[in-house]
Image (cartoon, rainbow, N blue to C red):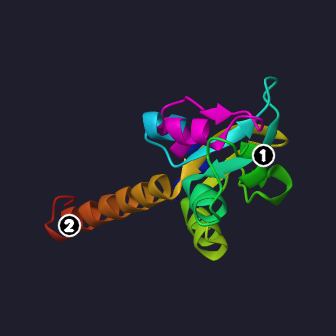
Amino acid sequence: MKTVKEILDSKNKAIWSISAKAKVFDALKLMSEKEIGALMVMDEKGGVHGIISERDYARKVMLLGKSSLETQVAEIMTPAEKMVHVKPGATVEECMVIMTGGHVRHLPVFEDDKFVGLISIGDVIKALVTEKEDLIEQLRNYISGKYM
């Protein structure tokens, strides 16, 4: 079974983040530029304060009639103490259970107390599909007698 560490090792190492004091508009602009759905909210020393996603914007700004130009990230982010997160040794299956059960699309990854990366539901599904494709190919080869 593939682990979160293996997913992170295969991904772009860039970690996109924003300050809690930044405006939501700036967070949305960065997410659009980087084609991502969430940003870690961090300070200049690398301390994690939370996570902000497109879903946070839709539910906590847009639907409430707030302005993304005036609202700070801190007002709508999920704070660090409420974030669902995983360790690098977690399996993709464990991540799928956590994500579907908690209705989250992004999982921060922490090794001890250190933030080491972020995985998305897309990363998890891609890893699961790849594992299943590999298994199917092995079964095809076995059935066709390739291993004899």
* x then y, percent, for residue 94: 62, 66
- Residue 71 covered by magenta stretch: no
Q: Tell me the quadrant of the picture where the C terminus can be found.
A: bottom left
* x then y, percent, for residue 127: 44, 55
Q: Which is more toward the observer, 59 or 86?
A: 59
Say whether residue 36 is left or right of residue 100.
left
Q: Residue furthest left?
A: 144
SS at mark 2?
helix
Q: Is residue 108 visible?
A: yes
For image coordinates 36% across by 64% down, the residue present is: 132
- Residue 23 covered by magenta stretch: yes
Q: Is residue 91 visible?
A: no
For image coordinates 64% across by 57% down, the residue present is: 61
Which disc number belongs to residue 140? Answer: 2
* Contact check, label 2 and label 1, Cβ < 8 Å: no
Which disc number belongs to residue 59? Answer: none
> Which amino acid type is shown beneath numbered disc 2?
Arg
Q: Nearer the viewer, mark 2 or mark 1?
A: 1
For image coordinates 30% across by 61% down, the residue present is: 133
User: Within the image, what quadrant is residue 43 found in?
Assistant: top right
Say whether residue 131 is left or right of residue 48.
left
| Magenta range | 7-29
Q: Residues within 10 Å of mark 2 (few under 14, many from 20)?
A: few
Say whether residue 43 is left or right of residue 18.
right
User: Within the image, what quadrant is residue 22 found in?
Assistant: top right
Q: Which is more toward the observer, 116 or 50?
A: 50
User: Within the image, what quadrant is residue 131 found in?
Assistant: bottom left
* x then y, percent, for residue 114: 80, 37
Q: CA distance from mark 2 to mark 1?
A: 52 Å
Which residue is label 1 attached to? Answer: 74
Say whether residue 100 is left or right of residue 11.
right
